[in-house]
Amino acid sequence: MLAVRNLTKSYGGNRPRRLFDNLSFELAAGEYVAIVGESGVGKSTLLNLIAGLDLPDRGSVTLAGCEMTALDDAQRTLLRRNRIGFVFQAFHLLPHLTVAQNVTLQLSLIGVPPAGAAQRVGEMLEAVGLAAAHASYPRELAGGELQRVAIARALVHRPMLMLADEPTGNLDAETGQQILALLRSEVKRSGGAGILVTHSAAAAASADRICTLTPTGLLG
């Protein structure tokens, strides 16, 4: 489903720092993989490269036969909207929209008709345990609930690939475990694949496979 080939990425001006050098890996349909590593090793950058939010110096990212790195900005945006669900640590919910409206926005962007969108949003909010909070605003919710809304928004369009960047970093241990179980179950239920980026060994244990990102590459 996902193939990363010879990915190389550096940052900086006159004295650039190289994060990746010829990094390669594959992800099959149905797989849920955790990528762990020390802070600053480039875990979030790797997710951004996979999602097409950033471009590598060299190498390619191919999702379901479509080479992300060969597309222009508009094409990458369209591919991301339709095939990728991104769960951010900082939630990135729109404060002036209700829970249901925040989740519906993802479907509006890809042209799902209102009737079908309403049904799918209702089902997704039920799956994350927030059906009763559909009319609430983000400011009225606790941290764990906000993360559940972010997950619902990321998965409501049934993406081919789910990317989660430290989704439990701001949560207490109990809520974090609930979020991890939810992510895994939704990825498996959708038949897609998922990548969880984390510095936590406990969070990584929820995945099918654990890979370690180091300055010399991806191990595992």
Image (cartoon, rainbow, N blue to C red):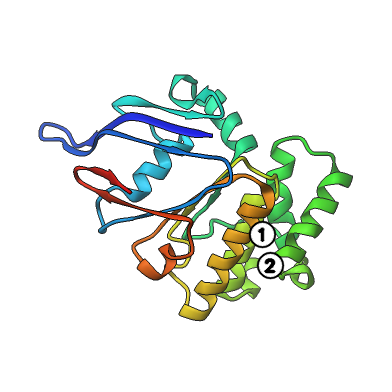
Residue 95 in sight here? no
Looking at the image, the residue that sits furthest to the right is 115
Name the amino acid, label 2.
Tyr
> Which residue: 61% across, 40% down?
160
> Which type of secondary structure does the marked residue at label 1 adopt?
loop
> Which residue: 77% across, 55% down?
121
User: If you read the primary sequence from the N terminus, does the residue marked by circle 2 or circle 1 appear first?
Assistant: 1
How far across and down, in percent of the image, does residue 111 sit? 76, 35
**Residue 166, quarter of picture:** bottom left
**Residue 29, quarter of picture:** top right
Q: CA distance from mark 2 to mark 1?
A: 7 Å
Looking at the image, the residue that sits furthest to the left is 15
Q: Residues within 10 Å of mark 2 (few under 14, many from 20)?
A: some
> Which type of secondary structure does the marked residue at label 2 adopt?
loop
The answer to whether marks 2 and 1 mark residues whose Cβ atoms lie closer than 8 Å is: yes
> Which residue: 48% across, 26% down?
68
Per the rendering, the mark at residue 174 is none
How far across and down, in percent of the image, does residue 184 sit? 57, 59
Identify whether 144 is placed above or below 191.
below
Q: Residues within 10 Å of mark 1 (few under 14, many from 20)?
A: few
Q: Is residue 34 left or right of residue 76?
A: left
**Residue 102, quarter of picture:** bottom right
Per the rendering, the mark at residue 137 is 2
> Which residue: 54% across, 23% down?
66
Per the rendering, the mark at residue 96 is 1
